[in-house]
Amino acid sequence: MRYPDGGGLTPAARAKREQVRLEAAGLFAAGMSPPVVAKKLRVSRKSAYVWHQ
């Protein structure tokens, strides 16, 4: 079940998560692979692959 409130995160945490996701998008646009982006941004490889889709 998905929750419409952002998965239990505070508004500040949701904003931070979105900032990281947008930074990942820029790195993907620059040609970086998901594993490299994951390591650089200190997120899971799974998250990086999902964002890359």
Image (cartoon, grey):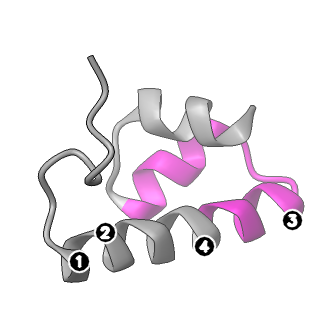
Q: Quadrant of residue 13?
A: bottom left
Q: Amino acid at mark 4?
A: Glu
Disc 1 residue crowd, few under 14, some 14–19, many 20+, Cα 10 Å: few
Q: Is residue 47 left or right of residue 53?
A: left
> Which range of residues does the magenta coloring cover?
24-41
Residue occupied by mark 2: 14
Q: Which mark is residue 39?
A: none
On residue 23, which mark appears? 4
- Contact check, label 2 and label 1, Cβ < 8 Å: yes
- What amino acid is found at the position of numbered circle 3 in the picture? Ala
Mark 4 or mark 2, whichever is nearer to me: 2
Residue under the image location 86 percent in, 65 percent down: 30
Residue annotated with mark 3: 30
Decide whether residue 23 is among the magenta residues.
Answer: no
Disc 4 crowd, CA 10 A, few/some/many (<14, 14-19, 20+): some
Image position of 1 (left or right of 51):
left
Helix, strand or loop at mark 4:
helix
| Nearer-the-camera pick, 18 or 44 | 18
